[in-house]
Image: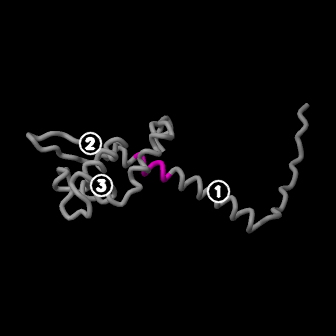
Amino acid sequence: MSKSMLRKPESAVANIFFALGDKTRLAVLAKLGAGECSATGLSEGASVTRQAIVKHLQVLEGAGLVGHKKRGREVLYALEEQRLREATEFLEMVSTSWNQALDRLRHMVEDPYPTPRPKRKRRVSR
């Protein structure tokens, strides 16, 4: 995990996962994966209104997952890939911790009474 992720308050990480925890917002992110798009374009084929898409975009933008820029009268949204990488790094850190814990548990279960190591004789220095 990057040092920047470790320094971020837990609430910043929680905001990322809160934003990712909605199927409409996940669909919006998937569409933005193909490139920048307007709210109107993102609402095409969606099961919610354009206004609902805009509200979802605000949540995603608040979490830093999406950014926007104006091109003339149109507002275009795009993924903020660094925040997605941070979420991935966090999940990898959690996965690594769990894998290590499961490995320790497996070793304890498979060999609950490990053979003690022979004691080494101490060398006396003179």
- Is any atom of residue 68 visible in this view? yes
**Residue 32, placed above or below residue 64:** below
Inter-mark Cα distance, 1 to 2: 38 Å
Which numbered disc flags the more N-terminal residue, 3 or 1?
3
Residue at far bottom of view: 110
46 inside magenta stretch = no
> Residue at the spot x=91%, y=37% of the render?
124
Residue 112, how many percent across, how many down?
A: 79, 64
104 or 6: nearer the eye?
6
Which range of residues does the magenta coloring cover? 86-92
Give, as a three-letter code, the residue at label 3: Leu
Which numbered disc flags the more N-terminal residue, 1 or 2?
2
- Is any atom of residue 80 visible in this view? no
Instruction: Identify the element where label 3 is drawn.
Output: helix
The residue to which callout 2 is attached is 67
Query: Which secondary structure dominates the residues rendered in magenta?
Result: helix
Looking at the rendered structure, which numbered label has been put on residue 53? Answer: none
> Residue at the spot x=43%, y=51% of the render?
88
> Residue at the spot x=25%, y=49% of the render?
54
Inter-mark Cα distance, 3 to 2: 11 Å
Which numbered disc flags the more N-terminal residue, 3 or 2?
3
Instruction: Identify the element where label 1 is drawn.
Output: helix
Residue 108, how many percent across, how many down?
A: 74, 62
Mark 3 and 2 residues: CB-CB less than 8 Å, in contact?
A: no
90 inside magenta stretch = yes
The residue to which callout 1 is attached is 101
| Classed neighbour count for the residue bearing mark 2: other residues with Cα under 10 Å, few (<14), some (14–19), many (≥20) | some
